[in-house]
């Protein structure tokens, strides 16, 4: 494990970015408001992220946001270095087509594609897409899907007959170079088994360090049984300021802006989730406002009105850097972060916490010559 850490940002493709925490995602009702998910605005977020030194940007998938593939393909042309961690749902696309799409994106973007495999934790949302398999079947199908995709990326001719998927005499004429890395999350036993066989990076949501350590140990053991070794990443929101007091004042402001009726509505929807990870997130906030600092500098307020990652690192630059190093000591090497709003949040973290980590020898900018806004004229197709 390297001492150097990797940081990624987030693209708010649900069209609800702004100065408040809005609902949406993972089976909750979206509340689009504020800044639109336009190429113009998301391009600003992407260029801010790459200028500040983030490696990639996570782009979500689901009925509550824009399509991840189309969004990122467009944004690759108004950015230069930033990679895109694109969410992909096995079962909604054939494995050959998915492998071909990934290859096209990877090769035309100059190697800027990473894939976040999402099996789907909400049957209601899956059924909107025409997928009526249950949770266990979705993981079994995902295992078959990744088996085929990985083989195609290796240049093999694939004949595969599984319980859920089949291909005959399948071979890609243009393989992705390099093959995109696979990111995979999930807290259930089935999720861990699939991750251990196929993932390059296992992702967890931001739980207190003790819970994260237990999960890492569990995944490492299953991966070792498969003869594999994984890297580990964590998904967190951030609220960072010059001082701890300023950061917590901002968290209090965000909390004050959350409508109790919205909390009740979102929590009712999340209670139907089949995701073990979502259940763990809900247990941290208890579904109500109150003492939401569940560990020093770890705040569970976001999860009151958002599905998925529900915790934020809150504090001064030095305090948040301390918490990041604490997670790193457990084995976390990659951090997928976000903030409200995402444009300003990229600067708060990039100009505050990243320099502090650089001073500590834990991070260095991935581009030796830092990109200025003038280096990538908008709309010029600057991917290289």
Image (cartoon, helix red, strand yellow):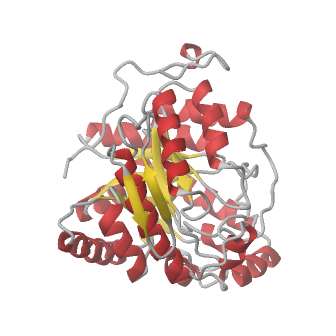
> In this rendering, does residue 297 appear at all?
no
- Vertical relation: 51 (above or below) 185: above
Residue 34 is left or right of residue 140, and the answer is right
> In this rendering, does residue 352 appear at all?
yes
Residue at 50% in and 82% down:
136
Residue 327 is left or right of residue 39, and the answer is left
- Vertical relation: 201 (above or below) 74: below
- Residue 348 in percent (x, y) is at 53, 41
Residue at 38% in and 82% down:
189
- Vertical relation: 143 (above or below) 54: below
- Vertical relation: 117 (above or below) 66: below
Quarter residue 69 falls in:
top right
Residue at 41% in and 63% down:
160
Residue at 49% in and 76% down:
277
Count how many numbered circles sit on residues in the image.
0
- Residue 335 in percent (x, y) is at 41, 53
């Amino acid at each position: 494990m390297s001492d150097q850490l990797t940081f990624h940002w987030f693209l708010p493709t649900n069209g609800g970015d702004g100065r408040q925490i809005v609902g949406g995602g993972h089976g909750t009702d979206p509340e689009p408001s504020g800044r639109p998910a336009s190429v113009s605005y998301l391009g600003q977020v992407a260029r801010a992220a790459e200028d500040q030194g983030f490696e990639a940007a996570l782009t979500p998938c689901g009925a509550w946001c824009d399509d991840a593939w189309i969004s990122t393909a467009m944004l690759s042309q108004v950015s230069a270095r930033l990679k895109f961690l694109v969410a992909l749902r096995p079962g909604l696309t054939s494995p050959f087509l998915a492998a071909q799409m990934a290859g096209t994106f990877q090769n035309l973007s100059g190697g800027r594609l990473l894939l976040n495999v999402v099996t789907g934790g909400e049957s209601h949302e899956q059924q909107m897409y025409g997928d009526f398999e249950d949770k266990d079947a979705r993981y079994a199908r995902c295992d078959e899907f990744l088996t085929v995709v990985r083989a195609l990326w290796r240049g093999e001719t694939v004949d595969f007959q599984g319980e859920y998927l089949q291909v005959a005499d399948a071979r890609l004429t243009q393989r992705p170079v390099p093959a995109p890395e696979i990111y995979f999350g999930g807290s259930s036993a089935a999720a861990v088994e699939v991750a251990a066989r196929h993932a390059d990076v296992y992702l967890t949501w931001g739980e207190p360090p003790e819970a994260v350590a237990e999960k890492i140990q569990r995944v490492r053991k299953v991966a070792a049984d498969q003869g594999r070794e994984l890297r580990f990443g964590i998904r967190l929101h951030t609220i960072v300021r010059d001082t701890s007091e300023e950061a917590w004042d901002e968290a209090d402001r965000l909390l004050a802006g959350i409508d109790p009726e919205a909390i009740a509505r979102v929590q009712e929807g999340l209670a139907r989730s089949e995701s073990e990870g979502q259940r763990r997130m809900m247990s941290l906030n208890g579904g109500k406002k109150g003492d939401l600092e569940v560990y020093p500098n770890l705040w569970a307020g976001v999860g009151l009105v958002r599905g998925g990652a529900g915790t934020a690192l809150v504090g001064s630059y030095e305090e948040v850097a301390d918490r990041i190093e604490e997670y790193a000591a457990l084995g976390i090497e990659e951090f997928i972060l976000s903030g409200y709003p995402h444009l300003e949040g990229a600067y708060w973290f990039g100009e505050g916490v990243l320099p502090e980590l650089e001073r500590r020898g834990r991070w260095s900018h991935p581009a030796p010559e830092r990109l200025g806004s003038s280096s990538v004229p908008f709309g010029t197709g600057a991917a290289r």
